[in-house]
Image (cartoon, rainbow, N blue to C red):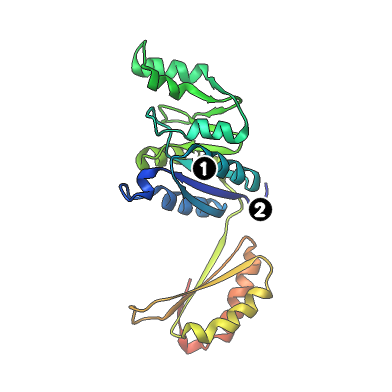
Amino acid sequence: MSTDKTAAVIVIGNEVLSGKVDESNATFLIRELRELGVTLKSVHVIPDEMETIAETVARASSKFDWVFTTGGIGPTHDDMTVPAIARGFGLELVVHPELNALLLRHCGDSPNEHLQRMARVPAGSELVWAEGLTFPVLVVRNVYVFPGDPKILRRKFLAIRGRFRSAPFTLRRIFTTCDEGELAALMEETESSRRGVQIGSYPVYDNPEYKVQITIESKDPAQADEAFEQLCSRIPAASIVRVA
């Protein structure tokens, strides 16, 4: 198993960009992917525009291991994610027999034209089933296509999340009363001396207990621990409130 899988999240919908809907899907996916050990490289929020979706998905697919799209897969005129993905990959839209049968069972023997659109997918698409799902997750190459409804997205993602497990991140934390400026040179020096280690600092202005939280992350637990010990040994002991 590769130690570092990468991903992009693409949120699709005019309703998000116009402020009509509060976006929560990206936040959920960011947290889940981090917990799974996946390195998220980018998050895009784009409109319901055929060319924009096609170009954004195709570009992300070529750069990262996995792409997760949310939104734009219903029966209405502005649900164009699936045909746009087909265009981006240069694939023909075809009626998927299994999806078509599902729609017939779900909607009766004669679903209307708009519902029938939902059975048309890019040629070669995969349907991923898991326990508890009424409809499968559509996968086009390395692109996982999710609905925009947060409850349905979460249920579907959690049902198949095991597919995306990668080597986990090791995270260590230091909480200190030092000012961020006092720590900048030390953090830079420590990060540059430890391969694959990322060090971040996050000032807090309304907490009387500490001023800065330092995070040390790495796929290599030994490197993370060594960087943590290096920082702890050089930050004044009296200023370290706690560690984790």
Q: Nearer the viewer, residue 231 or 242?
A: 231
Q: Which residue is mark 2?
A: 3
- Please identify the quarter of the rendering in which residue 204 is found: bottom left
Q: What type is the residue that disc 1 sits on? A: Thr
Residue in view at x 41 percent, y 81 percent: 211
Residue in view at x 46 percent, y 33 percent: 80
Residue 160 point in image, percent of width and height = 50, 38
Alpha carbon distance from label 2 to label 1: 32 Å
Q: What type is the residue that disc 2 sits on? A: Thr
Residue furthest out toward the top: 109
Residue furthest out toward the left: 20
Q: Residues within 10 Å of mark 1 (few under 14, many from 20)?
A: some
- Please identify the quarter of the rendering in which residue 109 is found: top left
- Secondary element under disc 1, as helix, strand or loop, is helix
Q: Residues within 10 Å of mark 2 (few under 14, many from 20)?
A: some
- Please identify the quarter of the rendering in which residue 189 is found: bottom right
Residue 153 point in image, percent of width and height = 41, 40
Q: Nearer the viewer, residue 146 or 90?
A: 90
- Secondary element under disc 2, as helix, strand or loop, is loop
Above or below, comparing residue 135 to residue 240 in the picture? above
Above or below, comparing residue 54 to residue 91 in the picture? below
Query: Mark on residue 52?
Result: 1
Please indicate whether residue 48 sits to the left or right of residue 194 in the image. Answer: left
Residue in view at x 51 percent, y 85 percent: 181
Residue in view at x 40 percent, y 81 percent: 210
Please indicate whether residue 55 sits to the left or right of residue 110 in the image. Answer: right
Q: Nearer the viewer, residue 87 or 72?
A: 87
Question: Which of label 2 and label 1 is nearer to you?
Answer: 1
Residue 134 point in image, percent of width and height = 40, 27
